[in-house]
Amino acid sequence: MRHVVTMTSTGSIGLVAIFLVDFANLFYISQLGINELAAAIGYAGTILFFSTAIGIGLSIAASANVSRLLGAGKTESARSMAGSALLSTVVIALVIAAIIYPYLPAIVALLGARGTTAQYSVDFLRIVIPSMPLLCLGMSLSALLRAVGDAKQAMTLTLLAGITTALLDPIFIFVFDLGLTGAAIVSIISRCIMVSLGLYLVIYKHGLLAWPQKRNVSSDIQALMRIALPAVLTNVATPVGNAWVTSEIASFGNEAVAGWAIVGRVTPVAFAALFALSGAIGPILGQNLGARLFKRLNMVLSDAIKFIMAYSLVAWTGLFLLQDVLANAFNAHGQAYDLLSFFCSFAAAGFIFNAALFVSNAAFNNLGYPLYSTAFNWARATLGTIPFTIIGARLYGAEGVLAGQAIGGIIFGLLALFVCRKTISWIEAKDSSGDLPPPPKQGYWRMALSAFTSGKGASAG
């Protein structure tokens, strides 16, 4: 538990710094008192969430592979793997940014943005999207620091980026009178600082980076892609689900979208430790799997669940008590205030189950079952989002959309946790030769569904 808490607390401080970049952007822009600008940040944030999700997926592959090699004592192989991971991260991010860029107006329109709001969103994205490789590279560098156990420096890496944004945002937005363009420029500056410091720490402090040798590149890339592709697909599911929610909320007007934008910035700051938890337990699971210390795997999951319960209750209470303070800080009025208030009072509780899904997915990725995290996240983003938000919107308006999203999260959070428990049990039951047993013939989804419908899923969770 001490290891879980240490890795999570340092990771959460670093993540708060990353999330504060978006938080600060929206806070300062909201001070201009223009609803269209705040709504534009909401639409742009949904698309940027997509690039962040890709970066998270690539960083998961880097962390899982490098930590496993370090746990097995294969230091040189770990250095080569780190080099291959960073190289592939930059290439993939460049390709995706190049594909997205020409279609930004169409994507923004698809989310429901219109007129001036849509133009503001596109202008902001045209500046920030080209720096997507920097964001993904910075995330992978932070993941490599966590893989080697240096949680403090991983925290410092992202913390410096957040401090840079907090200091420069008001200068570029107000002093230079650049508004939304100033916020975009500051985002790029913070990403450059994050990458520069990350490279220094990984190369000079830990000596963890080696240029991949030709004979290892093919095997390294294959090992990375086995985790990266499912992990990217897994993480992309979340912004896809959020895009659907944004389009549903957009039907209730700019005030509702502005409220959704505030929720989108408050959530990761308030629940940063839960986001960090999934990244923190990944290297712990990976190193113990590499060292074949199977009994510790279930221990890590149990401690993680205890942490989720305690932290979520504290964060939810804090949001409930501070909802009016947040509303005043972001100039939230009318429907924007109503949506923020509903989230702080009720919908925020659903993060207990979202966190269970995060942790289960981290376990699947690091224990060699990445396709299960992909399946669960996409099921959560589609079956657990679309029908529930449609019904919620028809019955209770914009607040009903948030309620529907939370209900879907409860169902799939419990299912994922149940299957994760079963997966670890199979790994613990390794055969005498030390090989990990194959999945049972029954299949995960069938077992999860039967357990859930029989009432056993909740007790397993």
Image (cartoon, rainbow, N blue to C red):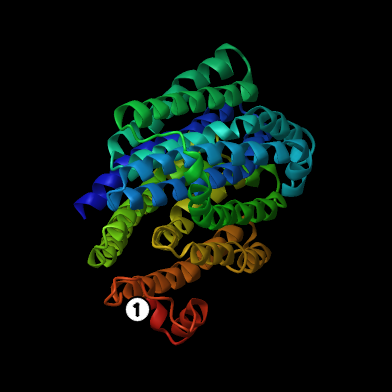
Whether residue 2 appears in this view of the structure is yes
Coordinates of residue 212 in the picture (x, y in percent): 47, 38
- Front residue of 74 and 374: 74
Query: In the rendered structure, which amino acid carries the disc numbered 1?
Result: Ser
Q: Is residue 4 above or below residue 141?
A: below
Residue 2, percent across and down? 19, 51
Name the foreground residue: 199 vs 244: 199
Q: Quadrant of residue 257?
A: top right
Counting from the top left corner in percent of width and height, residue 266 is at 47, 43
Residue for point 45% across, 45% down: 268
Quarter placement of the N terminus = bottom left
At 41% from the left edge and 78% from the top edge, which residue is drawn? 457
Q: Which residue is mark 1?
A: 459
Q: Residue at x 38, y 25 (%)?
A: 200
Q: Residue furthest top?
A: 176
When the figure is inspected, residue 215 is found, relative to residue 242, above or below; the finding is above
Q: Element at badge 1?
A: helix
